[in-house]
Amino acid sequence: MAPPQGQMRPGRQLAVLGFIFVVLYLLVFFAGANGSVKDRLEPKLGLDLIGGTRVTLEATNSVDGKPPTAENLEEARQIIESRVNGLGVAEAEVVTEGNRNIVISLPGENRNLDEVGSAAELRFRKVLKAADGSGTIAAPPAATPTPSGSAVPTPSGGATPTPSGSGAPKATSSPSGGQGGMAPASPSATPTPSASPSATPTPSASAEPVPASIEEQRKAVEQKVGAAAWQAANALQAPADLTADPSLGDKLKPFGTLSPQEVAVLPAQMQFNVPTIGCPTQLDKRPPASISDPKQQVVACEGGASKYLLDQAKVLGTDVDDADAVLDQTNAWVVSLDFTGNGQSKWTALTRESFNNEGQACDATALGQDGKCRVAVVLDNEIVSSPEIQGVLTGNSQITGNFNQKDASALAGQLRYGALPVTFEQQEAQNVTATLGASHLRAGLLAAGIGMLLVIIYSFFYYRLLGSVIFLSLILSALLVFGALVVLGRQIGFTLTLAGIAGMIVSLGVAADSFVIYFERLKDEIREGRSPRSAVPRAWIRARRTIISANAITLLSAVVLYVVSVGTVKGFAFALGLATVLDLVVVFLFRHPIMTMFARTRAFLSPRVSGLGRALPARNQPTQQPRNPRAKEA
């Protein structure tokens, strides 16, 4: 016999729920799954549960703060993934997160990943001037006379080309017979500032226009240091000669209070000429990409004590075809560079220009011991080395420095896979041992089990037969969530973390609230005189809106938290939202249909069994009719 029109058919909802379970677990066992049954039922666990390393990098922009384009972020992700894999790491995961973040995960392994997110923007720049970079306002020491009559640094011996094509120490012969070595300058040589403006370098090109945002930041810096200090700094054509004008030191003193971010927006000439702008606390700590523009002259430091005014970058990292960490003839680690065809032409032209000091662009303070220009190898904001060019180099070259094998390999890997199109700052780093991860997993599962057990105990104690509905609903919700975690882990890379387990535990409270709302509404309907069978659908209609609203608020909170958070907090938000959605599925497709079926049983009419308490006795108690006064009179 068919049910009356408009009456609910609970079998249909239960059939839909069964269909969802069948499809979900077919995906669990067969969609991208392999191995044993146990392997197919394993969700993808996060690093805090199995151990490993997790680093979150946030894209930054020192100019306007705008997020990078999706194309640049994806390119950066691919480069970082290549760098991580180049370290010999297996099963590394590098994914984008939002429009700014890249997350690097190494499950089961602890590694230092500080360098994989560096921009690795390689620039070869000619050293135009050198000055003291200590940042003090004391008068500079007197220049030590040399045969040429000028104060020059004393770099170590360079690699002098020989007719046979073999180089001196720290030089590598190229296949074409040209010299590939560049001798590094001695780090102990601190150049003295030049007091004479006569050796002003000739710029390679006119100054580029300044973006509006940087111009605004410069105005803010000008207001901070004061008009007098700004005018004094702007008038300098060479490093300030404090011996000639002692009061100049006091005028320029406010520049020593600027932050690295504020120093980064100053013109390069001002950064170089003002003696109170130093290397250790200001120039070396400027934001990433502060000197990345190859068309601009820049200021950079070497050894934390010498600051150089550098020319435009004539050779870039993109001109390098390959890089390898090798041992040179002196058994020191160096980075060997193979240039592209066009890059080799640029490099040869730069070494010719530096060897001949064309246009006398290099100031006397910047020349090496043999009177030749030096070329600074600049990686991001740092000078790796600044060798004197002692010949026109027509072959491959080397980057020399105080490298160990690890540093040389890391630098070679960065150069080999290319520079990142955007700069990053590390926002979060996490290292978890495998033992601690297993302990976290046990603790998380124990907490989830205790939470579910307490809800079930309370349900049977307070609602009795209705507690079985709660128990079955929680079991079905748990099975749905587990299957979804396994499938999502394979399809979109979602990993279950300790924070995710916490989100699921919180969702138990949301599920318990929906039970209370429904069952208490059912009691109210029975107290109002309706039969249990008719009270179930009416209670559902009146409780449904409240249940949906409560779950919608939880889901909205999870979405907002997921959007604005970073790292493992996203896992908490995602798990909370997923459990909330699946709880709604169970509410509509199981809880309400099974209650309709229970309402047709005799046990449902028993107060002791059903858990409806005093609601049923109150309904069954006859209503007292008022006495008829006329009957009394009769």
Image (spheres, rainbow, N blue to C red):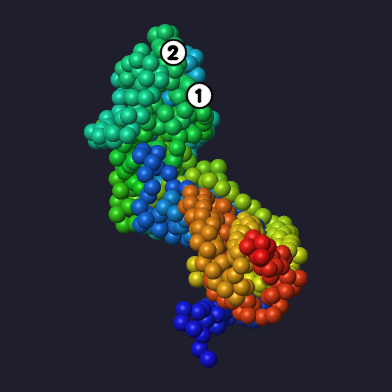
Q: Distance between the residues labelled 2 and 1?
A: 14 Å
Identify the residue at horizontal 60%, vertical 75% (top origin).
Answer: 533
Please name whichever residue, 53 or 114, is drawn nearer the observer in this view of the structure.
Answer: 53
**Labels 2 & 1 near each other (Cβ < 8 A):** no
Above or below, 302 relative to 533: above
Please name whichever residue, 358 or 69, is drawn nearer the observer in this view of the structure.
Answer: 69
Above or below, 175 relative to 314: below
Amino acid under disc 2: Gly
Is residue 251 toward the left or the right of residue 529 in the image? left
Label 2 element class: helix
Which disc number belongs to residue 209?
Answer: none
- Coordinates of residue 234 in the picture (x, y in percent): 32, 20
| Rendering quarter of residue 518 | bottom right
Is residue 592 toward the left or the right of residue 424 in the image? right
Above or below, 277 relative to 139: below
- Coordinates of residue 124 in the picture (x, y in percent): 38, 43
- Coordinates of residue 198 in the picture (x, y in percent): 30, 20
Please name whichever residue, 424 or 478, is drawn nearer the observer in this view of the structure.
Answer: 478
Amino acid under disc 1: Ser
Identify the residue at horizontal 54%, vertical 69% (top origin).
Answer: 538
**Quarter the C terminus occupies:** bottom right
Identify the residue at horizontal 35%, vertical 27% (top origin).
Answer: 218
Q: Residues within 10 Å of mark 1 (few under 14, many from 20)?
A: some
Identify the residue at horizontal 49%, vertical 55% (top origin).
Answer: 556
Residue behind mark 2: 249
Which disc number belongs to residue 134?
Answer: 1
Furthest toward the left, the residue is 206
Res 165 seen here: no
Is residue 504 toward the left or the right of residue 562 in the image? right
- Coordinates of residue 56 in the picture (x, y in percent): 53, 51
